[in-house]
Image (cartoon, rainbow, N blue to C red):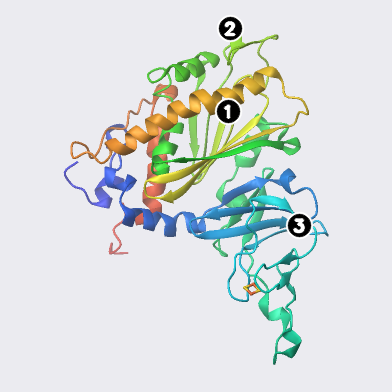
Amino acid sequence: MTDTTPQAWAEQPAEKALTLPSRYFYDPQLFAAERDRIFMSAWHFACHVNELAEPGAFVVREIFDQSVIVIRDRQGELHAFHNVCQHRGNRLLNETRGVQKGVIRCAYHSWCYGLDGSLRAAPRSDRIAAFNVDDYHIPPVRLEVFAGGVYFNLDPNATDMQTLFPGAEAAIREAIPDLDAMQLIQEDDVIVPANWKVIMDNSIEGYHFQLSGPHHVDLAALIDFDGYRLTHHDNWWTYGAPPNADAKQAYGVSLDRPPGNGDGFFNIGIWPHNTFYQFPFSQCMGTFMIIPLDAERSILRFGYYTPHDTLPEVTKASMRWMNEELGPEDIELNISVQKGLHSLGYDQGRYMIDAARSNESEHLVLHFHRLVFQALHGDASTPQEAPS
Ligand code: FES
Ligand SMILES: [Fe+2]
């Protein structure tokens, strides 16, 4: 591409499009723009609603330098508010999750807050002129429950999730009927030295399945790879396939029954960085959250949820396989791509768009990049000064 204006990139026809220039994956200024224009108004998955079943149960989530408390009060209401004391700014909770038995007490001067973020008491404030506890409510953060997930958004004016992601909840519920019964069994954070989009790009194309490492080839063999479909719906997308009907084993465990409903591979992405999935033959739901730290580092949060008290062997094996085999294989690719993107010998590649073969095509990567691009540059195909 010789014309490198945003408008020229946005106007490329999909079949001939060149990828986002490599600076989009490491330039700190572009990353700062993504932070402000994408993540500061994004819906961030905090936890499954069942993680907050008990009164006082909370999770603390961080994005960049912001920390948010999501908590259930004693009346059963969920609240999200900033994790900061209104006196001199001390961070209130330092654990990631727990159950708050009484008030939330600041460790510095013991200001005490209710589970809705209201200030209940401030020691010695009765000696202070015109001190009113009602003036020091911790500012709330937008919270929504969507498809069994509790989400927060730092933008008070953010559009609600049902409007942003029409149809997504129905798609999750159809693929994961036990969604409401899911309980967290494991959560691990891994810091990956790669831009958040490098990780996302890797997860939303099947082109590399049969062409990269051995564990990807194993995954392709567990599904009806010809039936792998990647579909976008504006701000959300799905990719999945029916199970391989001839599979005799999965993740090293032999299958004691023929493949049935719910044994397929299912993934759903909720813009910009929330992914939920179910592996073939596995009865657990995985979460795959890509939480950007800076232009070239991201947290990959692997969560596992199941409706079962006792995990089937094949499900346990699928979690182990993700943590020890497939996950690391992809992470290595992501780290290697991140290094390559700095090369003076590379700027843009070619999206491998094959309209006839969804399973091997990179159309979803292009769609995702267009969403990023639009968030950064507005609708670049329409010049700002165009006469009306
Ligand atoms: S900073 Fe929290 S009570 Fe003083
Ligand atoms: Fe992969």
> The N terminus lies in which quarter of the figure?
top left
Which residue is painted at 71% across and 20% down in the image? Answer: 312
Residue 302 sits above or below residue 218 on the image: below
Is label 3 in a helix, a strand or a loop? loop
Q: Earlier in the sequence, mark 1 or mark 2?
A: 2
Amino acid at the residue labelled 2: Asp
Q: Amino acid at mark 1?
A: Phe
Residue 388 visible to the viewer: yes
Viewport quadrant of the C terminus: bottom left
Q: Is residue 33 left or right of residue 138?
A: left
Report the residue marked by disc 1: 266
Residue under pointer 2:
246
Q: Nearer the viewer, residue 105 or 357?
A: 105
Q: Secondary structure at mark 1?
A: strand
Disc 1 under 8 Å from ligand 2? The reply is no
Residue 100 - label: 3
Q: CA distance from mark 1 to mark 3?
A: 36 Å
Question: For numbered disc 2, what is the local secondary structure?
Answer: loop
Across and down, in percent, residue 157 comes to 56, 64
Tell me the quarter of the picture where residue 93 sits.
bottom right
Amino acid carrying label 3: it is: Gln
**What separation in Å lies between label 1 and label 2 (alpha carbons)?**
19 Å
